[in-house]
């Protein structure tokens, strides 16, 4: 077998074929996590709890609205499409962590399981052939974030569902491409009916952890936001851009406090897919947040906080 064929076979082995053409994955021990076979231990729960509560307390002390969104796995939103033998557990890392938080911090953290299940009555919320959710689910997440933020931040511009335009296209997802033959689907994409002026004033072109993009709106009176995210946030970012005067987006599972001190945003948002809460690293150890002793901003991004702050204005495209 060729190297390419061997790679495809290895990737295909991690695809679980469910009902009605729905594909699921075993990536990052996702199935072990959602079935309760790989729960967090007490120390691991404590590390997550202390990290999230510290993030929320620091933002509160600096007059910043903090929100954290845990994005449910497709497996739990579409549990009815899983093959027989896969039973969800309430003792999975996402639930363990949320249950450990103090009430004030818990109120700032969302886990969109029921909204994403309920929305299936209107539109699909996860792609059949992909690990990711749909564009509509990304808008739903944005809408719920804005509902939460409206309590503490003025939001003069907010994208509404009536602002969206829907179109269908053929899509081969990151699971469908692993199979032979490849499996495709009809997916619905979303864009805005009315374009609002903005520019991307910086991008470091790193396609991994440490990727940074900075967007600015023409309306400088809007609030400012820093988003720490994974790939699921790509479906939210198009709606955040016109909502904020400056949006700094960093691919990171840790909070970079130097960046926040420099940017002084009105809002900090953290989004993370459920499986990243309990995954193992290459040595079989649990991957845990390390905001204070982990890699610094410049090491991850190739730029200091001051460097990033300097990128501003529509005439400063790199």
Image (tube, rainbow, N blue to C red):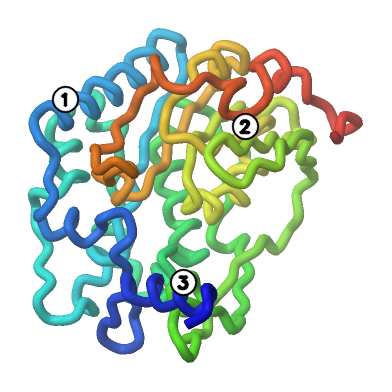
Q: Tell me the residue at 27%/44% (across/down).
A: 280
User: CA gap, disc 1 to disc 2?
Assistant: 29 Å
Q: Tell me the residue at 52%/34% (across/down).
A: 227
Left or right: 117 in relation to 317: left
Q: Which mark is residue 138?
A: none
- Residue that badge 2 annotates: 248
- Residue that badge 1 annotates: 46
Judge by depth and name the residue closer to the eye, 284 or 113. 284
Left or right: 202 in relation to 282: right
Judge by depth and name the residue closer to the eye, 71 or 142. 71
Crowding around mark 3 (Cα neighbors within 10 Å: few <14, some 14 to 19, many 20+) is: few
Residue 79's place in the image compared with 69, above or below, is: below
Q: Are marks 2 and 3 in contact (CB under 8 Å)?
A: no
Crowding around mark 1 (Cα neighbors within 10 Å: few <14, some 14 to 19, many 20+) is: some
Residue 244 seen in the figure: yes
- Residue that badge 3 annotates: 7
């Amino acid at each position: 077998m060729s190297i390419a064929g061997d790679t495809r076979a290895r990737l295909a082995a991690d695809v679980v074929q469910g009902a009605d053409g729905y594909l699921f994955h075993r990536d990052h021990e996702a199935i072990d996590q959602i079935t309760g076979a790989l729960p967090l231990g007490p120390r691991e729960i404590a590390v997550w709890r202390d990290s999230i509560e510290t993030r929320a307390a620091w933002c509160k002390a600096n007059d910043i609205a903090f929100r954290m969104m845990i994005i449910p796995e497709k497996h739990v939103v579409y549990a009815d499409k899983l093959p027989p033998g896969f039973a969800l557990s309430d003792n999975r890392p996402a639930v363990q962590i949320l249950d450990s938080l103090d009430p004030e911090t818990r109120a700032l953290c969302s886990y969109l399981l029921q909204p994403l299940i309920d929305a299936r009555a209107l539109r699909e919320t996860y792609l059949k052939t992909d690990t990711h959710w749909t564009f509509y689910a990304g808008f739903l997440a944005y809408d719920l974030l804005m509902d939460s933020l409206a309590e503490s931040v003025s939001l003069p511009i907010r994208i509404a569902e009536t602002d969206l335009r829907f179109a269908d296209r053929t899509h081969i997802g990151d699971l469908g491409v692993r199979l032979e033959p490849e499996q495709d689907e009809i997916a619905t994409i979303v864009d805005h009916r009315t374009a609002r002026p903005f520019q991307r004033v910086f991008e470091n072109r790193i396609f991994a952890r440490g990727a940074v993009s900075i967007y600015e709106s023409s309306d400088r009176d809007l609030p400012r936001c820093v988003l720490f995210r994974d790939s699921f946030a790509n479906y939210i970012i198009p709606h955040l851009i016109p909502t904020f005067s400056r949006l700094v987006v960093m691919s990171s599972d840790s909070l970079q406090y130097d960046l926040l001190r420099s940017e002084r945003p009105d809002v900090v948002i953290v989004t993370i897919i459920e499986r990243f809460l309990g995954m193992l690293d290459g040595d079989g150890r649990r991957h845990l947040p390390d905001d204070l002793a982990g890699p610094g901003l410049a090491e991850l991004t190739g730029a200091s906080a001051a460097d990033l702050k300097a990128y501003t204005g529509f005439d400063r495209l790199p």
